[in-house]
Image (cartoon, rainbow, N blue to C red):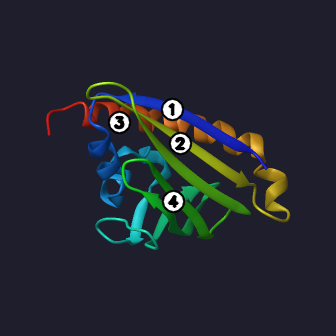
């Protein structure tokens, strides 16, 4: 199973970063425009057990995904698991590690499997890893801009 992991250090308190990522509207703000992320059914603030449905532009088609918050430790860990979607398996962990006064390191760890069947021959693990690298480069830059501003 491929694993993607990346980190960013933010100039803000841990609680601010954690609260930011609990809000689907903020996820849309930091997602690359070309993926066309749109939440179709989501609470304003995620909680343990929350399910949220969204659409993304992937591999030439609009894909509908359904994820659930399967683990939540306030200020430390947020885990979302794919319930329905394109990939064979997807678990995304957001880890929060305070780094001194007013800083937090946010680490994203994604365990996934490419799509099953014939599509998996085209959409390989390496292709997905490359796309995640690009998307998270953009996402981290946006988070740094938005969260380093005064609240």
139 sits to left or right of 108: left
Query: Along the polypeptide, which appears first: circle 1 or circle 3?
Result: 1
Q: Is label 4 in contact with label 1 (beta carbons under 8 Å)?
A: no
Q: Which residue is mark 3?
A: 142
147 sits to left or right of 55: left
Query: Along the polypeptide, which appears first: circle 4 or circle 2?
Result: 4
- Looking at the rendered structure, the secondary structure element under dot 2 is strand
Query: Along the polypeptide, which appears first: circle 2 or circle 1?
Result: 1
- State the mark number for residue 7: 1
| Image coords of residue 138 (percent x, y) | 45, 35
Q: Residues within 10 Å of mark 3 (few under 14, many from 20)?
A: some
- The residues bearing labels 4 and 1 have C-alpha atoms spaced at a distance of 23 Å
Q: Which residue is mark 4?
A: 56
Dividing the picture into quadrants, the one containing residue 102 is top left
Taking 96 as reference, is 11 above or below it?
Answer: above
Q: Which residue is mark 2?
A: 108
Q: Residues within 10 Å of mark 4 (few under 14, many from 20)?
A: some
Q: Is label 2 in contact with label 1 (beta carbons under 8 Å)?
A: yes
- The residues bearing labels 2 and 3 have C-alpha atoms spaced at a distance of 15 Å
- The residues bearing labels 1 and 3 have C-alpha atoms spaced at a distance of 13 Å
Residue shown at the point (44%, 43%) measured from the top left: 32
Dividing the picture into quadrants, the one containing residue 15 is top left
């Amino acid at each position: 199973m491929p694993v993607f992991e990346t980190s960013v250090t933010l100039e803000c308190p841990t609680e601010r970063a954690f609260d930011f990522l609990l809000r689907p509207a903020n996820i849309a703000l930091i997602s690359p425009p070309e993926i066309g992320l749109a939440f179709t059914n989501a609470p304003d603030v995620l909680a343990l057990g929350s399910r949220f449905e969204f659409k993304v532009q992937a591999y030439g088609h609009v894909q509908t995904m359904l994820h659930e918050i399967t683990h939540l430790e306030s200020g430390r860990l947020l885990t979302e698991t794919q319930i329905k979607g394109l990939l064979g398996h997807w678990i995304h962990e957001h880890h929060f590690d305070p780094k001194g006064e007013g800083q937090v390191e946010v680490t994203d760890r994604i365990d996934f499997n490419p799509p099953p069947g014939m599509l998996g021959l085209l959409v390989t693990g390496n292709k997905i890893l490359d796309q995640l690298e690009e998307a998270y480069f953009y996402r981290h830059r946006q988070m740094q801009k938005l969260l380093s501003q005064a609240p």
